[in-house]
Amino acid sequence: MRRNCADTLVSYSPSLPDGAMVIAVGHYAAYGSNLDPARMRAYCPHSPMVGVGWVEGWRLTFAGEGDMGWEGAVTTIVESPGDRVFVSLYDVHPWDASQLDEVEGVAAGAYQKVTVRVSTLEGDLSAWVYVFHGYEGGMPTAWYLSEIANAAEKAGAPDDYVHDLRQRPTRTQAPEV
């Protein structure tokens, strides 16, 4: 008896109860202060963190100093062969996606969504990131850089990555502790 391909297919999708529906989610690769899981829960309560990884060939930098109405520059990433950026991965529910776009300044034109490849221990996947729509340059405030380093630590970034973040120059002096 001859079999065709359809006879040998295996389904890897769970069966759904009657009336259930599947909602498409997209992967978001958070960097900067959005590495903080508590911050992301506040912005995107329907979107779980699903892992961490690296965006290879990109580097974390700062931009928008003077353009954003802040005391210092904001975080962004730029293509840079040989570098990499630590990210937290989220399955973003459509209900949360528009809120996140608003918070990140997409509608205002400050940031744009870019799809990148993220390397994880389970393999590579595609995710979107927010990239500043303008020129790289400027320095963050000491407070903002501290927020970014603390967020990276909370997300489980390697110690050397967090240390390197804390060593970056800032526009303002770090407060005395």
Image (cartoon, rainbow, N blue to C red):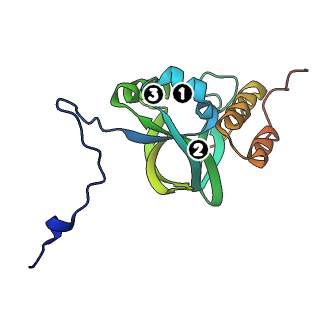
Mark 1–mark 3 Cα distance, whole angstroms, equals: 9 Å
Q: Residue at x 17, y 29 (%)?
A: 19
Q: Residue at x 45, y 47 (%)?
A: 127
Q: Nearer the viewer, residue 75 or 159?
A: 159
Q: Position of residue 171 (x, y in %)?
A: 78, 30
Residue at which label 2 appears:
87
Q: Amino acid type of disc 2? A: Val
Q: Position of residue 117 (x, y in %)?
A: 48, 55
Q: Earlier in the sequence, mark 1 or mark 2?
A: 1
Q: Residue at x 70, y 23 (%)?
A: 71
Residue at which label 1 appears:
40
Q: Residue at x 10, y 79 (%)?
A: 2
Mark 2–mark 3 Cα distance, whole angstroms, equals: 16 Å
Q: Residues within 10 Å of mark 2 (few under 14, many from 20)?
A: many
- Specify the quadrant that holds the N terminus: bottom left
Residue at which label 3 appears:
100
Q: Nearer the viewer, residue 164 or 77?
A: 164
Q: Is residue 48 visible?
A: yes
Q: Earlier in the sequence, mark 1 or mark 3?
A: 1
Q: Amino acid type of disc 3? A: Leu
Is 93 on the left or on the right of 29, as rendered?
left
Determine whether label 1 and label 2 are within 8 Å by CB. no
Q: Secondary structure at mark 3?
A: helix
- Specify the quadrant that holds the C terminus: top right
Q: Residues within 10 Å of mark 1 (few under 14, many from 20)?
A: many
